[in-house]
Image: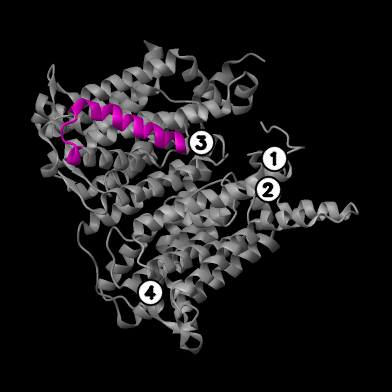
Amino acid sequence: MKRILKRRESTLLISLIVLVLLVSLRSPSFIGPKSLNAILNDTSALIIVALGQSLVILIGGIDLSVASTMAFTGMVTGLLNLHIPGIPAWTYLPIAAAIGACLGALSGSLVAFGRLPPLIATIATMSIYRGFVYVFSKGAWVTARDMSPAFLSIPSTQIFGLSSMVWIAILVAVAAGIFMRFASSGREVYAFGGNKVAANFAGVSERKVEMLVLTASGLLAGLAGVLWVSRYGMAQSETASGFEMQTVAACVLGGVNFVGGAGTVLGVVIGALFFGVVNNALTVIHISPFFQMVIQGIVIIFAIVSNTLIDRSNQMKLIARRKI
Amino acid sequence: MSRESKMDGRSRVEGSRLAGRRPSLGRRLAGFLGSWESLIFLLFLLVVSANSLISPIFLDPANLFDATLNFTEKAIIAMPMIFVIILGDIDISVASIIALCSLFIGMAAANGVSTPLLIAIGLGVGLLAGLFNGFLITKFDLPAIAVTLGTMSLYRGIPNAVLGDQAYTKFPADFGFLGQGYAIANIVPLELLVFLVIAVVAAVVLNFTIAGRYSYAIGNNKTAAKFSGVPVARVRMAAFAATGLCSGISAILLTSRIGSTNPNIAMGWELEVITMVVLGGVAITGGKGNVLGVIIAAFLLGFMRFGLAVVNVQGAIMNIITGALLVVAILLPKAIEAARHRPMREKSL
């Protein structure tokens, strides 16, 4: 019990629940099924992309190209749907994921083989991918009117009371959790993020890990791209612009360490949900959405400072307890 | 990246000259090309000649000076950013600091504050924002990217909360001179002069002062620097404060040039500034870089965008080209280096 309480995820989860309860004092319908469902739907894309982002942050990098990848796959699937409406709707998911994985692998090879730091490689691919969205669409928008009803229903089909978008986020989170905990590649990501030199001597291939995390991040962003576009019924060159920073913020709040090597799937999911709740709560308690950014900033700074201070005090306690 | 590959090409050529044998022409050429400043200077010449082919009036002095207006505000922030990145840190909140400064300048101007005071407000807010970044980073020893990600939201969030979808457009008549005025024979933009002064200060500090040497020492090995008595926290603090201050200067010039302020001002500039610095040869891993390379990179990027705009290339395609340029400019010297040293190349860890 004590061990569970000590974990960062539990602190975060408790503050999340407290936040939800506080908001529901002002507006009781906030904890109603309809409102909770809306929060889950709004947060699904963030959860999916943030999980990919967390892999890259785990190895001490960052993937700034995720939002551009979303715009890319969103536009490609949107255009596919516009020109060949007959394709079964579910096939857009693997198509988008595959395109996303290719884009991620391209960033990955710049890092793994070109030895570019992930930050620089993804700054470059970020503008390249978004540029191509514009080239493909010639600057035009693909709107809900151009999309087939089947395409628009991809994220909203109801299964056991939850929308398919939420189910996809749950599946991704469970798969990521199993992968990070039990697959040897998943453990290699932690090992590599914790200490590159040591991991190298233990036989972890640097290139393999770098390719793996960036490809996975691209794949998940690609998947989220088609969900985003079909949910909002709009594909344009500015799709999800600035979303990359939100995914990084969700990771930071979820306790993924920027120095690399520490962070859990559960933490990232709760971190993403936290932002989802805050954003939805603002409208419920009648605070202008223009305050969203200030609050997000304060939450991030508070999370980083408190996480680091708690970490340090834990380490000091461990050192103090050690017999010399 | 291994330390070996960071060695610049020219020093190897000089090394073999000292050893008494004249390097072959090919090697000397490769060494020249391998040096970062010469590589991007060649690219710069390429852009200038392409531009003058496209547009006969490009080399006209008045036009040439005006072409600098689209990048000097970013280049001003790139100068202190050189220090931040050499230190092994990064500051992604600079564009948000511009928005914050611009908000306070606009707010004060709407209340009838005079131009000198507006300048003081812009500088003061920028400095405070930079100091706050530096305080969080050095006081708690937090990763700079995480902290400035937070302040990036915070600093742009404040104008968002205050202004919403409104904008300030009322400024004193003489305020516009700062961003739109010309000095020296009425042809050199004031902005360019401000940039050149800041660039000279940055070059002097980096090359001829203790603080500059400290920056390289910290960037190469923070722990070793600390144990050698380098005031690591103070140097990092100063770098973030300078970045905030220069963002304030940039905010004053930008607000004056466009004559309005809204929460979305300078959106995405942080990445353009970082691109400039990295293209200028500053290693994002820290410890390496100089001012001259970044100045050339600023002119290269600015003139390239100018030329592309002349031939009606869309912004999105410019972004593709900028992104590709960044990748190629970093990969090319590495590829040349690798080709030259293939026989004795060691496998880096």
Measured in 3D between alpha carbons, the distance from the residue under mark 4 to the one under mark 1, in whole angstroms, is 44 Å
Chain where mark 3 sits: A
User: Disc 2 marks which residue?
Assistant: B217
Q: Residue furthest top?
A: A1
User: Disc 4 marks which residue?
Assistant: B117
Q: Position of residue A223 (x, y in %)?
A: 30, 31
- Tell me the quarter of the picture where residue B317 sits: bottom left
Q: Position of residue A250 (x, y in %)?
A: 34, 34
Q: Position of residue B315 (x, y in %)?
A: 35, 59
Chain where mark 1 sits: B
- The residue closer to the viewer here, B206 or B7, is B7
B94 on left or right of B2: left
The magenta-colored residue range is A81-106
Measured in 3D between alpha carbons, the distance from the residue under mark 3 to the one under mark 1, in whole angstroms, is 33 Å
Callout 2 secondary element: helix
Q: Amino acid at mark 1?
A: Ala
Chain where mark 2 sits: B
B228 on left or right of A179: right
Please say if A287 is above or below A3: below
Q: Are marks 4 and 1 on the same chain?
A: yes
Residue A99 lies in the magenta stretch: yes
Q: Amino acid at mark 3?
A: Ser
Measured in 3D between alpha carbons, the distance from the residue under mark 4 to the one under mark 2, in whole angstroms, is 39 Å
Q: Which numbered disc flags the more N-terminal residue, 4 or 2?
A: 4
Q: Residue at x 12, y 36 (%)?
A: A148
User: Disc 3 marks which residue?
Assistant: A109
